[in-house]
Amino acid sequence: MGNTFTARGTTAVPDALSLSNGGTDAFFDVLMPAACDLAATPWELRLAVLLVDSGHRHLGVWEGFDLAELPWTGGWPHEKAFLLRVIDLAATGHGRDRLGYEPPFAAGYLADYRAMAAGFTPVPAVGTGWDAPPDPRHVERCREHGLFHGSYGCPWDGRPAWRVPTPPLC
Ligand SMILES: [Zn+2]
């Protein structure tokens, strides 16, 4: 099983990032610390929580998503800029010391995804609720890893074993 992350309408080629489950782990593993450490506004905090919730490998279910499915608001230029900052910070290796392994293919994933996001123009939605701060419990940080707890607790706690992610599908 794999997961495909898309950006409908992006000008980037390719316009999709297809990852194995191990690759999906790595993708979220590198994005989460950057998102948690950069997030400040309610929308940014909610995106960080979404990434943390999505990065829970022990839930056993991964899904790709399309960037158009994110609840962009009228402030989408700032929101898109935040997403790009998260990808850029992740690309620097931010948080890898806390992660405990070096995802070998993460740089390629991030480069492709950054191009997809940069070429994507969000369409604002109404009444998403993302203009209100998230549940304060969801943005409490794990003392060991610094990640938000999200809805399910720190995704790096209690992992059975570190494993090297498998290569991408394509
Ligand atoms: Zn933790």
Image (spheres, rainbow, N blue to C red):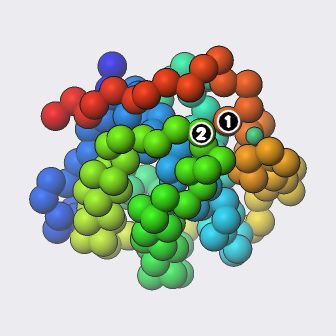
Q: What separation in Å lies between label 1 and label 2 (alpha carbons)?
A: 10 Å
Q: How many marks?
A: 2
Identity of the residue drawn at 45% across and 65% down? 92
- The spot of residue 104 in percent (x, y) is 35, 41
Q: Disc 1 or 2, which lies upstream in sequence?
A: 2
Asked if residue 58 is positioned above or below residue 32 in the image, the reply reads: above
Q: Ligand 1, what quadrant?
A: top right
Residue drawn at the location 30% of the way across and 72% of the way down: 118
Q: Amino acid at mark 1?
A: Trp
Residue at disc 1, secondary structure: loop
Residue on which the image places disc 1: 156
Residue that carries the numbered disc 2 in the rendered image: 100
- For label 2, count other residues whose C-alpha is less than 10 Å away and answer few (under 14), some (14-19) or many (20+): few
Q: Position of residue 77 (x, y in %)?
A: 45, 82
Q: What residue lies at 67% left-to-right and 35% top-to-bottom? A: 156
* Callout 1 crowding tier (Cα within 10 Å): few <14, some 14–19, many ≥20: many
**Mark 1 CB lies closer than 8 A to ligand 1:** yes
Q: Label 2 CB, ligand 1: below 8 Å?
A: no
Image check: 35 left or right of 22?
Answer: right
Q: Measured along the vertical axis of the image, is residue 21 above or below residue 119?
A: above
